[in-house]
Structures are given as C-alpha cells and as structure tokens.
Image (tube, rainbow, N blue to C red):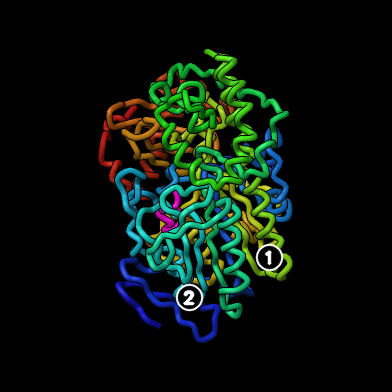
C-alpha cells in the first residue's frame, strides 16, 4: 500500500485488485472503511440550486406537490435538521466536495474566489478506489472539474433555454432544449451507455434549477395560475432589533425586478436588469418564443394596465414569484422521477445510495425576502433526503444535526474508503444504519463572507444548537443576535442584550468559541473581547 505525505490508507478496499492511491496534501486517516458492509455501493447525488425545504411536499404541504421527491423520502430517510456551512452556491459546493468549511477549502465567496481543483475531494478519493465518477450540470467554482472520468458543466450559472456546456476538451458547445431535461438526459446516457458496468459509480447530477430567474419549461407555463398563495406572516417584517436585516437588498417588494425576475418585459419599459432578461429570452428558438409570448403577453398587458403600487404591488410580486418558482420545481421533480425510474428498471436501487439536496435553502417571502445568505433558518436549512441501499434499514425522519461538510466522509465510508483526518465533517453512515451515536454533535457552525456584494448581506458567523442561535455580524458592523428557536421559530425577536439572557448568552458564546477552535477558523483570533459578557 502506497503512502504519500503522511497519508496512510487503512481498511479493506471493495474492488479486488484495485489499490487506493494516496493523495498529496492531506494528513492521516481518522476512520477505516466498514468491513462488514456488502457493497460496493453506487452513489447518485442530485443537487439543485436554491431549492428550499418548504417547497417540497415531503417537508411542507402548504405550497408544493413533489411526488417524485416524496418517493425518496417515503421509501428512505428525511433529515429534518440539515444545514449548510455557508449559504451561497459556490462556497456550499466547495464545502460538499471537500468536507471542509470555507476557510479551509479556500472558496469563501462567489465574487473573489477560484476553487483550487487540485485539492483533495471525495470524487478523487472514490476515483482512486476504483469508482467511476461523473458530473453533469452546474459547477460554479470557476476552475474546471477534476476527479471525474466524465463531465460536462454549464458556464457560471448556466441558461435555462438552449444552454452552453463546457466539455472536457475545454471547448464550449450549445445544446438545444431545456436545461433540467438536458442534464438528466446526459446523466442517464452516461449511466446506460458510457460507464463500465462492472465497476461501482458515483454520479453528481447538478441542476441549475431552481435558481433565479425561475424560467419554466414551456410545457409548464400555465401551471399554478389559478392558485393564490398565502403570504408568510412576516412578509411585511420591519426588522426591528435586527440591524443587519434592515440593510439587506433582497426584499420581494423593493428588489425583485419586474422584468428580469417576473418577466414583465415590454419595449417601452426599462429596468436595470432588462438586458440580462433579454439575453436569456433571445436564447430561445422561434417555437419556444411563440409559446412564451402567448403565455406572458396577456399578463404583461394586465400588469401595466393595473399600475399597482405599494402593498398591492408587493403582494402581486409575491404571487408571481411563487408561481414561477413552483413551475421550475415541477420540471425538476419530473426529472428526478426519470432518474428513479431508470435505477428501478435496471435493478440498481438495491445497491445505490440516492441523495437529493440543495446547495442551501431560500426565502419564499419570509421576512419579505427572496435569496439566501443569512444564517436565519430558511437559508441555513437545506433539504436532505436519501434512498438507502439494501442492508440499511433506517426509515423516516432523522433528527441529528448534519451539515454539508458531512457528505464527503459519509460517501467515503460507504465506499470503504478511509476518511482523511483533515476532513472536518463527520460521517453519518452509522445513523443511516439505525444507530444513535451518543457523541454526535450538539451544535453547528456557520460563516458567510460575501460582502459587499449583490443583496448586501453583512458578513457574519454563528453557532446553532438544538434550541438557540447566536450570530455575530462584523466587518463594517458589530451587531449580535440571539434567538430562542423554540419560542421564536421565525426569528423575529433578537434576545441579545435583553435582561435575563446573560446565562444563555454566555453558554452560546462558549459554544461559538468551541466551534471556531474546532474548525480552526482564523476569525476566532479577532474581537475576543466581544465574547465576554
């Protein structure tokens, strides 16, 4: 067995005659593969963008119907305390791939960072263990993927209609069709026609959906037009006691662009994002434009004729937002169904872990917002459901607190590949087996960096346990927030500095200190005096 740079690989390897090669730049392994497992197990990892748990019917029945996603949850497990380490697309993906927080993997924000693709990632470890690996869809890490036998990615955010793809040669090609369908087509083609069926596989199916600006497939344009959605009870939040929330630029009423976001484009109307919308629209072919225009033109004329203002406009925007978002979810759910049907037809479900998640949550009008970034529950929380292979008998809700840094070690342990010591996440494979580890974490750590930038959400870090959440906004602000999630689940009442909260505040400050030391966040060296009560 080869060792390099202090990496010593231990434990049984699933594939006869296939050695696990060491990767440079890592430390010794902290876990060996589970020798009792029958494997090898395949991994199908489906990740969407900005799909929030409250818009999946297995989590919340108020708005969405997602029957295919529900198939995974009903036949498998649903994590009800699943969180991200940094609620932003690129950073979240980097955390998932590396099993490390943003300050360790180097990709802290979308505006200044390029992901160092040469660093160790779980697909590389699986590839070296004899797995075939593939990635199709959104990458959003600026560099080109490494560790995949086959990949095609969209540039940046990608386009919903007739999108470009960067292929392995580095060239860019355009494909005809709707992006969610195309990503699924490519994934199924690889599974059926391109992979070596004698080897285990790991495929990452990464969708652009349900990212802004929520352009539905033409076959779904008319859906949900007869539905009126209830406003969140804090839709008209005034952010009292929450200084950082007041300055964020993500209110549906004030910052959601009528043309770009809600498609109310007309030659005589202008917005700052009009050109961006028209660039997306102009990717459509004549048949797609005809269907698009036939649907939207009457709505556009009615919208401008009404000349809505104030509260009426804010409520109208919310309804259009909800409908467009759900139409995009519809295509996504159908395509997840296609993947499940294929795996079932080919008798692959019995030895395949199927994971569905998103890169973070999203605001559907809560606090009056869209987008993510904040450490508040709607964006900190991310859906996570799994179909488990045979031999894993756990079913139903899983209540342990997990983060996206935990995916990498879980996949590695499932594959019998040792988990390197420098991975910061923890494998929850034992939980999937039905165990209830006594030493499982009692808190999670979060750090958001992208400021100043779009939506102007202040930099902040914080800690959350099973009841309380402590957040510190910093950089050009020094503001603390403390929430009792049991009594105040919508995070409307900042308890920091309130009489009687000294003991709880001190306890959460200590948990914050412990988390920052555990994950070696350099920010722990700053503002130490602010942690004393």
- Which image quarter: residue 507? top left
Direction front: furthest residue: 286
| Residue 176 drawn at (x, y percent) | 55, 55
| Residue 7 drawn at (x, y percent) | 35, 72
Task: Give the quarter of the figure containing the N terminus.
Answer: bottom left
| Residue 226 drawn at (x, y percent) | 73, 29
> Which residue is identified by label 1?
343
Residue 413 forms part of the magenta stretch: no
Query: Is 113 located above or below residue 338 in the figure?
Result: above
> Which residue is identified by label 2?
129
Quick check: can you spot residue 465?
no
Indicate left or right for 354 with 166 as reference: right
**Marks 2 & 1, CB-CB < 8 Å contact:** no
| Residue 453 drawn at (x, y percent) | 34, 35
Main secondary structure found in the magenta portion: helix
The structure residue drawn at horizontal position 31% and vertical position 66%, both measured from the top left corner, is 25
Residue 93 forms part of the magenta stretch: yes
Indicate left or right for 458 with 265 as reference: left
Could you tell me how far apart the alpha carbons at marks 2 and 1 are, in whole angstroms?
A: 23 Å
Tell me the SS state at disc 1: helix
**Span colored in magenta:** 92-100
Q: Residues within 10 Å of mark 2 (few under 14, many from 20)?
A: many
The structure residue drawn at horizontal position 70% and vertical position 51%, both measured from the top left corner, is 68
């Amino acid at each position: 067995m080869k060792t390099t740079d202090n990496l010593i690989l231990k434990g049984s390897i699933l594939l006869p005659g296939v050695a696990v090669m060491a990767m440079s730049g890592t430390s010794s392994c902290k876990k060996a593969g589970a020798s009792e497992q029958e494997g090898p197990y395949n991994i199908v990892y489906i990740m969407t963008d900005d799909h929030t748990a409250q818009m999946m019917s297995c989590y919340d029945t108020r708005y969405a119907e997602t029957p295919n996603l529900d198939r995974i949850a009903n036949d498998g497990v649903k994590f009800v305390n699943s969180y991200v380490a940094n609620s932003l697309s690129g950073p979240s993906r980097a955390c998932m791939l590396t099993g490390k927080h943003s300050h360790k993997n180097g990709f802290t924000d979308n505006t200044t960072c390029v992901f160092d693709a040469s660093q160790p990632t779980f697909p590389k470890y699986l590839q070296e263990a004899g797995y075939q690996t593939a990635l199709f869809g959104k990458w959003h890490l600026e560099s080109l993927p490494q560790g995949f036998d086959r990949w095609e990615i969209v540039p940046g955010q990608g386009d919903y209609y007739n999108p470009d793809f960067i292929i392995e040669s580095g060239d860019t090609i355009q494909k005809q069709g709707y992006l969610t369908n195309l990503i699924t087509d490519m994934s199924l083609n690889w599974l059926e026609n391109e992979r070596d069926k004698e080897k285990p596989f790991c495929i990452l199916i990464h969708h652009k959906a349900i990212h802004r600006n929520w352009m539905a497939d033409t076959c779904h344009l008319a859906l949900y037009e007869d539905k009126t959605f209830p406003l969140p009870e804090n839709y008209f939040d005034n952010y009292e006691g929450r200084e950082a929330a007041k300055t964020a630029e993500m209110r549906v009423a004030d910052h959601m662009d009528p043309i770009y976001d809600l498609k109310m484009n007309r030659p005589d109307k202008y917005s700052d994002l009009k050109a961006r919308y028209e660039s997306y629209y102009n990717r459509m072919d004549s048949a797609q434009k005809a269907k698009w225009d036939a649907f939207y033109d009457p709505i556009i004329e009615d919208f401008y004729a009404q000349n809505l203002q104030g509260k009426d406009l804010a409520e109208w925007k919310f309804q259009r937002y909800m409908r467009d978002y759900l139409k995009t979810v519809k295509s996504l759910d159908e395509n997840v169904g296609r993947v499940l049907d294929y795996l079932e037809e080919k008798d692959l479900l019995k030895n395949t872990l199927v994971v569905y998640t998103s890169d973070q949550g999203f605001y559907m009008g809560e606090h009056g917002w869209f987008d993510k970034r904040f450490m508040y529950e709607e964006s900190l929380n991310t859906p996570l459901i799994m179909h488990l292979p045979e031999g894993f008998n756990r079913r139903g809700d899983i209540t342990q607190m997990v983060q996206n840094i935990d995916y990498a070690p879980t996949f590695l342990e499932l594959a019998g590949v040792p988990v390197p010591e420098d991975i910061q996440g923890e494998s929850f494979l034992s939980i999937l087996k039905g165990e209830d580890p006594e030493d499982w974490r009692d808190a999670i750590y979060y750090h958001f960096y992208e400021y100043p930038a779009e939506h102007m959400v202040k930099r902040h870090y914080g800690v959350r346990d099973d009841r309380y959440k402590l957040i510190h906004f910093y950089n050009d602000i020094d503001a603390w927030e403390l929430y009792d999630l049991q009594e105040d689940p919508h995070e409307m009442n900042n308890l920091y500095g309130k009489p009687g909260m000294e003991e709880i505040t001190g306890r959460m400050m200590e948990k914050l200190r412990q988390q920052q030391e555990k994950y070696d966040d350099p920010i722990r060296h700053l503002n130490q005096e602010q942690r004393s009560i």
